Amino acid sequence: ALFASWLARRPATPARSYGFYRAEVLAALSNAAFLVLICIGIFWEAAQRLLAPRPVDAPLMLAIAVAGLGANGAAAWLLTRSALHRHDVNLRSAFLHVVGDLLGSVAAIVAGLIILLTSWTPIDPILSAGIGLLVLRSAWRVLWDSVEVLLEATPAHIAPEQVRAAMLEVPGVRGVHDLHIWTVTSGFVALSGHVEVDETRPWSAVLLDLAQILRDRFGILHVTLQPEQPAALPEAFRGCSLESPEGLRSCLLPLDEVTAAPHRH
């Protein structure tokens, strides 16, 4: 996780124009997937120990658990502020890993005390399975969030139709299509789209208003917009869009037919 955070802060290159931001997402995905596998292993081991109980050295178990609690507690304290306030999926996965170990130590202490007082050994696998369920739920959420980022899905907190409606409020905007909103990494949302404009305002003024409304209302800072004047486009090209097979076919015009009409960038 620390290496991924360092790598993500390296500057962009011509070949990697977005830099190495996705390193954090890949690290979070790997960490979360590893936690899911660990939880499955915990469930399997707990089931085996419930079906075939084994003797437990309660004093040794308590000593190891107390030592682990101290180490994991310190690590969790160091990660708490960053993981909870930066909304970084990589730090969330690292924090989850540490919390899983911390809860495991607490469960081992409780189980050790109960076994020491009552000799009831099934409490150990029962508590282990319970902690595994808690960690699995959180790990699955981090895993899913990482997959969503890698698939360039629209962030869960942003509704594309609300973004489109807000853009249409800007004077001079007649239509918006091919709207794409995705997460590059935690806290870095990007947007691209085609904007149909009229002749009432210069594009520079329209673009300034669009950038401001996207930043203020939705927190989208990286914006790439292509202006279009429908009347200046070839008839067949006006339906160009990546949102449907028909629209995509309209984009595949011969180059001479497209460039014959005046256009703006």
Image (tube, grey):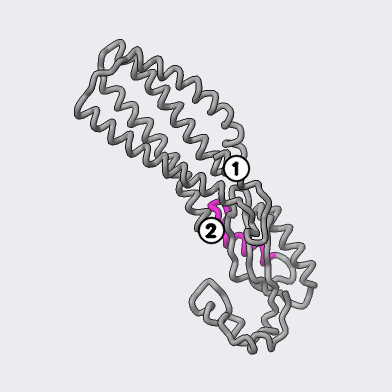
Q: Position of residue 221 (x, y in %)?
A: 69, 55
Few, some or many residues within 10 Å of mark 1 (<14, 14–19, 20+): some
Q: Quadrant of residue 169?
A: bottom right
Q: Which of the pair 83/232 is nearer the observer?
A: 83
Q: Position of residue 228 (x, y in %)?
A: 69, 76
Which residue in the protein does label 1 denote?
5
Q: Gap between marks 1 and 2, in whole Å?
A: 20 Å
- Which secondary structure lies at badge 2? loop
Quadrant (top left, top right, bottom left, bottom right) of the C terminus = bottom right
Query: Which residue is at a point 49% across and 31% down the rendered structure image?
Result: 98
Q: Is residue 39 left or right of residue 29?
A: left
Label 2 is placed on what type of residue?
Glu
Q: Quadrant of residue 178?
A: bottom right
- Which secondary structure lies at badge 1? helix
Label 1 is placed on what type of residue?
Ser
Say above or below: 97 vs 147. above
Residue sitting farthest toward the left: 52
Q: Which mark is residue 261?
A: none
Q: Does the magenta portion include 150? A: no
Few, some or many residues within 10 Å of mark 2 (<14, 14–19, 20+): some
Q: Which of the pair 263/59 is nearer the observer?
A: 59
**Numbered range of the magenta stretch:** 153-169
Which residue in the protein does label 2 denote?
152
Query: Which residue is at a point 31% across and 23% down the rendered structure image?
Result: 124
Query: Which residue is at a point 71% across and 81% down the rendered structure image?
Result: 263
Q: Which of the pair 204/108 is nearer the observer?
A: 108
Q: Does the magenta portion include 163? A: yes
